[in-house]
Image (tube, grey):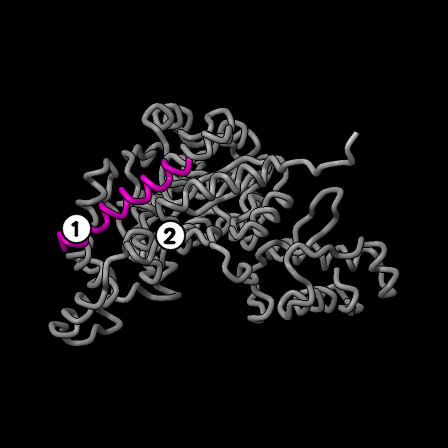
Amino acid sequence: MSARYQLTGTTAVQISASIESGIRTGALSPGAALPPVRALAAELGVSPATVARAYQELRQRGLLATAGRHGTRVRPRPPVAARRSALRPPPLPGARDLSGGEPDPRLLPPLGPHLAALAAHTGPSIGYSDAGVLPELAEVARARLGADGVPAGELTLTGGALDGIERLLGAHLRPGDAVAVEDPGWANLLDLVAALGLRPIGVPLDDEGPLVAGVAAALDAGARALVVTSRAQNPTGAAVSAARAEALRALLAGRRDLLVIEDDHAAELARVPLHPLAGATGSWAFVRSVSKPFGPDLRMAVLVGDETTVARVTGRTRVGAGWVSTVLQRLVLALWQDPTVTELVQRAAQSYEQRRDGLLAALAEHGLTAHGRSGINIWLPVADETSTVTALRDAGWAVAPGALYRIAAPPALRITVSPLNTEDLAPLAAALAQAENPTPPRGFPT
């Protein structure tokens, strides 16, 4: 913890507010250690129970995390808006940033022509009573999902994949409930689980998706929900195979008390078949976002599931945001129905595959085994994240440390391939190999 920031307060509410203020202003940075309970209690002249309550309240809100022997620390990305100066600093000048996890903007379909067409043909404004899912969009969405084997009877829309997952977890779970998540897994999801006051249970995975034994262990530990990434898993690129889906469906069959959420965020960008778990349990939902193929600013996802689950999400949306903008719905529908856009998305998917496979092959030439079956990221196990990230930074490459995505999984790096060109692959692989296995310094001659 920064020596310049002094925690204050004589009640649990005041102490937690002081800590939150430090996080918001940047005085307490992500990962900063807080004083031990008894030490802070003595410093503030309050009982240890008061400080413990303050820490507990912030842990339940996802701002703090208990790190075992390392004590209590600020979470890497706490759910509170910080001042701009406290945000992650940019890479060093001239460095190539491979840490973002975003699609290549050069391969996103242009929105201008479709926005112009909408402006020219838009009708009267939609009123509150008429808003909702457009029937024509629902029809096309059901057809697209049905082609992938996803039953799409009950359907609604959310403001992106994470918004849909948040509404699903909020509709079925309560603070303190356990949810099984992939480990390593999507950092935003791990942050969301913490912010909702839920208890994450990490499920290990391989290139074919969550391990059956890991899911079984999570269920035995009391998990009430399971979140699975269908394809292009972030950060590892895993994709659920046909054999893994069959084994998981057998394990999950008949579980009426378990909510299964499938996240197919990559959708059309994933050049591997979809093998859904939809319908394996009584409560289920399948979420497909449009952000990765068509643009991150298109905050919309299609959500299908059992009748009760979809009704809960729809009802909660109605008393909150209300609906997803019909202007956005019409834009997405136009993109779906444009053959030129479809061809562009297919070319983007092929380009990501070539870059991903090329980097995996280049790393293999240096004796490094990485993972990336689908999507825009690869996952490279390393001995020490901090030293490797630092060495890469000094060599002009910025990558994401695996700690952002791990619960109990071993150290690794996440590398986004979308900013790479073909000529970058060999130099990057060489830099990664040198960072992971640095040449020892020369000593005095003997």
Q: Position of residue 144 (x, y in %)?
A: 20, 45
* Quarter holding residue 269: top left
Pointer 2: what residue? Answer: 161
Q: Is residue 191 left or right of residue 28?
A: left
The one of 183 and 372 positioned closer to us in this rendering: 372
- Quarter in which the N terminus is drawn: bottom right
Earlier residue among tags 1 and 2: 1
**Identity, as a three-letter code, of the amino acid under mark 1:** Val
Q: Is residue 34 above or below residue 287?
A: below
Please tell me which residue is depicted at 71% across the width and 37% down the height of the picture.
442
Tag count:
2
The answer to whether mark 1 and mark 2 are in CB contact below 8 A is no
Q: In front here: 44 or 372?
A: 372
The residue at the point 17 percent across, 45 percent down is 143
For the residue pair 45 and 366, the one nearer the viewer reads as 366
Q: Which residue is rendered at x = 23% and y = 62% of the image?
A: 110
- Percent x, y of residue 374: 36, 38
- Prevailing secondary structure of the magenta residues: helix
Left or right of 358 on screen, residue 121? left
Residue most toward the bottom? Answer: 124
Q: Is residue 47 above or below residue 265?
A: below
Question: Alpha-carbon neighbours of circle 2 within 10 Å: few (<14), some, or many (≥20)?
Answer: many
Above or below 285: residue 136: below
Q: Residue at x 34, y 44 (%)?
A: 264
Q: Secondary structure at mark 1?
A: helix
Whether residue 357 appears in magenta in the rendering, the answer is yes
Q: Which residues are magenta?
A: 336-360
Compute the Cα span from label 1 to label 2: 19 Å
Q: Secondary structure at mark 2?
A: helix
Q: Mark number for residue 140?
A: 1
